[in-house]
Amino acid sequence: MADITIDAADVLQTAGTKRGISAAVITAGQIITNDSNGQKILADASDNTKISDLGMAVCSAPNIGQPILWVKLDSALEIGVTVANGKGLWLSETAGSLCDDEADITSIGATHVLLGCGKGGTAINFDATSPLQGTEIT
């Protein structure tokens, strides 16, 4: 499967949000991390400097320097895309994206980061508090 396409208008959190400042243009539904200044940028499985302190943006920041809301843990995060119950959701090699098939992470050195799973509808169990990680070595 390819990356999951999430429409920013469909993202709705049910758990508490965190607040940060964007260092990039970020759209609700994208996976984010911190840059060296602690500001939010897009996470990327193929860049080991962009896989820590992950979360999902739940509002958009159309300009750099704007406040952004994000979640690290939400057991019923609405993304507007149906994901099969129990289907794993992985940080993609496309900056800011999720994919629903670990086999799509193919670059040598890419980090496989499991961020949650589907619940059989348009809500997912998102958990970036201690994501399962491994590295592609072949």
Image (spheres, grey):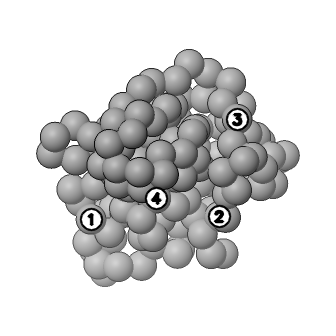
Chain-order first, disc 2 or disc 1: 2
Q: How far is mark 2 from mark 1, CA to CA?
A: 19 Å
In depth, the one of 69 and 111 nearer the eye is: 69
Helix, strand or loop for disc 4:
loop
Q: How far is mark 4 from mark 2, CA to CA?
A: 11 Å
Q: Residue furthest top?
A: 16
Q: How far is mark 4 from mark 1, CA to CA?
A: 12 Å
Q: How many marks?
A: 4
Chain-order first, disc 4 or disc 2: 2
Please, what is the three-letter code of the amino acid marked with disc 3?
Answer: Leu
Cβ–Cβ below 8 Å for labels 4 and 1? no
Q: Which residue is mark 2?
A: 4
Please, what is the three-letter code of the amino acid marked with disc 1?
Answer: Asp
Q: Which residue is mark 3?
A: 12
Please, what is the three-letter code of the amino acid marked with disc 4?
Answer: Gly
In depth, the one of 91 and 62 nearer the eye is: 62
Q: Which mark is residue 47?
A: 1
In depth, the one of 55 and 109 nearer the eye is: 55
